[in-house]
C-alpha cells in the first residue's frame, strides 16, 4: 500500500496540482491531467498508457478504496483531507471525493496504432471534434464496441480534459489513441495499413444498413455542422444513416455508437 499523507491546509504546496480544478482546466496542466471519481481513477490505475502521479481522497473514503489503492506503486503519494478541506482545494463541492493527477506513460503515433491492429479491426478517426461531451461519448462507445484505436486530427479537442474523461467513464484512459500530425494524409495512412475508410455523412452514397462491414474498418467522423472535409468524403466510402422526414442530423457521439455497433456485429458474424 502507498503511504497515506494527511492534508490539513488547502494551501499545502504538495497538492498544488489539485488547486482550483475548474480554472486550471481552462489553461492546461503542462502535459498532466485530472481524473475525477472512483470509476475514472480506477481506469487510470489500470491503464498501461497513463500513470497516476498522485491521488487526493476524502478521508472518509479511504477504507472503501483500499483495494484500488493497493494496485498503486508504493511510491505514489495518496493525499487525504476532510471534505471541507477537499472542497476548498478543488474550488467547488467535490461530491465524488476522489481526484488523481495523471500523466502519459507513452505517446504512440497513428502509424504505431494502425500497425498493431490484427486482421479484423475497427478504428475511429475524428476530424474537428471540439466538444468535450462529444469526445467523451465517442470514446465511451469505442470502448463499448471494442474499437482498437481512436485517432484524432490536429483540430480535435483534448480527450484528457477532465470533462471528456468523466463523460467517457474513463474510456479515454483505456482505448489506445494517437493524434495525426498536421502534414499527415489520413487516407494515405489508412491505405498503407490496408484499412477501408468509411466516412459518415448525411449525404453518404449508401446506407449504413446496406454496408457489409470491412474486415479492417476505419470509421471517419467529422464535427457537427461542417462534417468531414469534402476531399476525404470523395476518397472514402461515404455512408449515411437514414432519418425520418426532413431531419438529417444526429449527434456525432450517437452516430458513432450506431455505426460501431453495426460494424462490430457484422465483423463478428
Image (cartoon, helix red, strand yellow):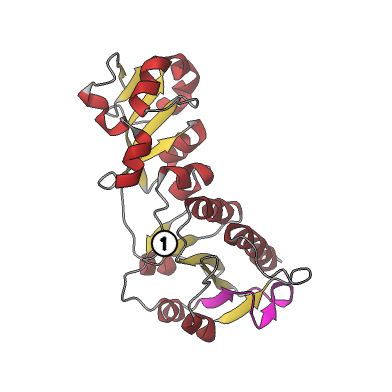
Quarter of the image that includes the N terminus: top left
Answer with left or right where residue 53 lies relative to residue 224.
left
Does 253 appear above or below 41? below
Quarter of the image that includes the C terminus: bottom right
Answer with left or right where residue 58 lies relative to residue 101.
right
| Residue 150 spot, x, y in % from top left | 47, 61
Q: Quadrant of residue 116?
A: bottom left
**Residue 197 magenta:** yes
Compare residues 163 and 54 and report the one nearer the observer: 163
Compare residues 100 and 249 and report the one nearer the observer: 249
Q: Quadrant of residue 156?
A: bottom left
Q: Residue at x 42, y 58 (%)?
A: 177
| Residue placed under numbered mark 1 in the picture | 156
Compare residues 267 and 141 and report the one nearer the observer: 141
Is residue 214 visible in the rendered image? The answer is yes
**Residue 138 magenta:** no
Task: Name the residue furthest left.
Answer: 13
| Residue 163 spot, x, y in % from top left | 46, 44
Give the residues drawn in magenta, as a range.
195-213
Amino acid at each position: 500500500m502507498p503511504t497515506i499523507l494527511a492534508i490539513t491546509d488547502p494551501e499545502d504546496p504538495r497538492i498544488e496540482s489539485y488547486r482550483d480544478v475548474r480554472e486550471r482546466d481552462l489553461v492546461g496542466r503542462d502535459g498532466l491531467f485530472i481524473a475525477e471519481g472512483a470509476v475514472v481513477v480506477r481506469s487510470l490505475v489500470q491503464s498501461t498508457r497513463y500513470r497516476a502521479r498522485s491521488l487526493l481522497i476524502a478521508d472518509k473514503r479511504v477504507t472503501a478504496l483500499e483495494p484500488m489503492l493497493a494496485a498503486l506503486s508504493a511510491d505514489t503519494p495518496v493525499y487525504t483531507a476532510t471534505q471541507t478541506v477537499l472542497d476548498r482545494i478543488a474550488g467547488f463541492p467535490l461530491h465524488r471525493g476522489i481526484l488523481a493527477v495523471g500523466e502519459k506513460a507513452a505517446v504512440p503515433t497513428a502509424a504505431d496504432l494502425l500497425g498493431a491492429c490484427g486482421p479484423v479491426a475497427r478504428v475511429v478517426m475524428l476530424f474537428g471534434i471540439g466538444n468535450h461531451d462529444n469526445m467523451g461519448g465517442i470514446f465511451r462507445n469505442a470502448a463499448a464496441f471494442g474499437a482498437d484505436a481512436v485517432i484524432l486530427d490536429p483540430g480535435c479537442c483534448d480527450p484528457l480534459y477532465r470533462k471528456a474523461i468523466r463523460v467517457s467513464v474513463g474510456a479515454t484512459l483505456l482505448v489506445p489513441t494517437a493524434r495525426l500530425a498536421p502534414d499527415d494524409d489520413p487516407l494515405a495512412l489508412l491505405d498503407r495499413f490496408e484499412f477501408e475508410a468509411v466516412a459518415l455523412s448525411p449525404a453518404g452514397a449508401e446506407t449504413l444498413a446496406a454496408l457489409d462491414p470491412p474486415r479492417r474498418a476505419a470509421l471517419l467522423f467529422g464535427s457537427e455542422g461542417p462534417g468531414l472535409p469534402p476531399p476525404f468524403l470523395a476518397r472514402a466510402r461515404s455512408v449515411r444513416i437514414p432519418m425520418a422526414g426532413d431531419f438529417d442530423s444526429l449527434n456525432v457521439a450517437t452516430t458513432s455508437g450506431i455505426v460501431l455497433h453495426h460494424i462490430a456485429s457484422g465483423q463478428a458474424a
